[in-house]
Image (tube, helix red, strand yellow):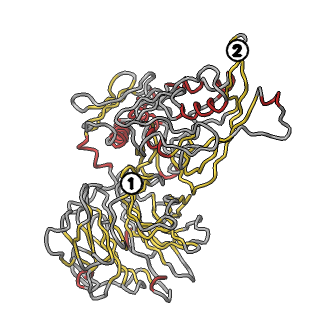
Amino acid sequence: MSALLGCGVVVLAGCGSMPVTGDVKAVDASQPGDSQVQVYAVAPREGAPPSEIVDGFLESMTSDDPAFATTRKYLSADARRTWQPGGTTTVLAQAPNRSGPLLHDEDNRATRDRETTYTLTGEKVATVDAQSSYQPLAPTDYAQTLHLVLEQVAEGKKEWRIDVVPDGLVLGQSDFKRLYRSVNKYYYATGATNGRSTLVADPVYVRNRTDPVTRMDTATQTVRTLLAGPTNWLRPVVDSRFPTGTALRKGVTALAPDDQNVLKVPLNQKAATAGRSACRMMAAQVLFTLRDLTSARVERVELEGGEGRLCALDADDAPEFSADRGSEGDDSQYFINDKGQVERVFGATGDTGTPEPVTGPLGAGTVPMGSVGVARDEKRAAAVSASGQYLYVSSLETEGELAEPLVTSGAKKAEDRLSPPSWDGRGDLWVADRDPAGPRLLRLAGGTGEPQEVRVPGLDGARIEELRMSADGVRIALLLTKDGRTTLNIGRVERRGSSVAPEISVEDLRQAAPQLADVSAISWSGRSRLVVVGKEEGGVQQVRYVQADGSTSASGALPGVNQVQSVAAADDEQLPLMAETVDDGIVKLSPGDNWQTVLKKGKALVYPG
């Protein structure tokens, strides 16, 4: 391999991810996700045989080769002009295996001396499309052929080159994680939420360091994809304040805050057509999108048009656009004690004193409850009775009698009745009735009145076991059971018709953790991430973070904890993760710490939402 490629290495030693000959196993070029390892592309050596050309081409795809100029040297003259590396990226569980040459009965010696074919195989686990949108897949077989010919490269001199090659890149999972990173770009939820515009995270993948095609750094790539508009999956429920055609000013390849932490973003003339209010909302989109990308905190975003500054937004003013802006007590948790009463734990640490019953009938416990969901403003709570049959909504601010239930399930068994409730950022309450005779997803506008049945056309016979609404109100996480398996799916909440009586449906369900054969508990954790409890096929229970697009979070698996029954995470990712366990009661995991017991007795702990 050293005759073909050299490896530039920072921090770790490691060279090459591609097989060299025949039936070999893939070897990862780097430690999984280690972005410090850098592979340098090397041109094909003179007289290289076809197998070496294939290996060199695949290896070169895992590099940061500018414009893929060196990578293209493995291609024929025609293929060099037509190959589009910026197309769909195919992600395999391991680096692809190469086998060949393929031989056919009709092949003859003369033909094999001037052309040949090799096959690439592997297990496909995901794709990234031209919009940089990640799509996880249940592992499927991957097979692709590369055709090579002897091509004249100089007078009297021929070399093997690839003349038939699919567009896009083919990468093993470890190389993909090394080369790319997940970022959230932000758009506004269609329709105001409680009278204000709310930003929604739209996760995409961009290159670490510099993109070989555009030569843009990571921040500039991210702004470029923000300006291009939302991904197709999210597009029906969000919009952008940037005028159509807005783009970065020609030639901009790097964006970074100055020594005052001010980030200036040069845009083309189209941006100047936006009014001042819209411009400020555009700046908020940029600020939220870039806040986690730079080592220095961005304190101010300034948008510049063709004739100078258009508008600016300070970081201190950005929270007004956030979907997770809660009350002053949004670090509190709520749970149900052994008497079926709802209690509150004050403070993020969970150990600031004895839990106290909430104000109102849910705290008094006239009806024992089995699960609870607290509105994000913490003024009301919804609770499902211990039998699972009734859903109640009650004030957390005033005393009084428990009102009549708003939803009643007619199922005979408790496990077939109502799911734990969940509130979205719009103040609407959601619950699933699991009655086999008539399963349904219900929404109560404002948490009151007659429940509205929500269509979920993609269920395909599956039953909703549990649900969690995102703070922005446009995404719903569903645990769906079918054929004895429970999987995590994310749906898009679409609202049509009038704002007074909208027709609501959950569209375009997509599996978010296909690697898990059985999922038992979920919770949103931040703007575009979930914490998931589940098992891989034949594996043991694990707790891990998963991005809303189904990709594995950089945080990865969490420290082990035994027999988890439910989890609770906050919109603020710095607050502790909570879990209900069989043996240890309710436990917490603070950032950088290990699991600690908070309450020996109690169940169904939740954050507001």
Vertical relation: 594 (above or below) 408: above
Q: Is residue 159 left or right of residue 597?
A: right
Vertical relation: 54 (above or below) 370: above
Identify the residue at horizontal 62%, vertical 29% (top origin).
53
Question: Which element is circle 2 on?
Answer: strand
- Residue 452 visible? The answer is no
Vertical relation: 389 (above or below) 443: below
Nearer to the camera, 35 or 389: 35
Identify the residue at horizontal 73%, vertical 23% (top origin).
150
Nearer to the camera, 397 or 158: 158
Q: Identify the residue at the far left of this view.
A: 353
Residue 157 disc label:
2
Q: Which residue is mark 1?
A: 556
Question: Which element is circle 1 on?
Answer: strand
Nearer to the camera, 322 or 30: 30
Residue type for callout 1 = Gly
Q: Is residue 86 left or right of residue 241?
A: right
- Residue 34 visible? The answer is yes
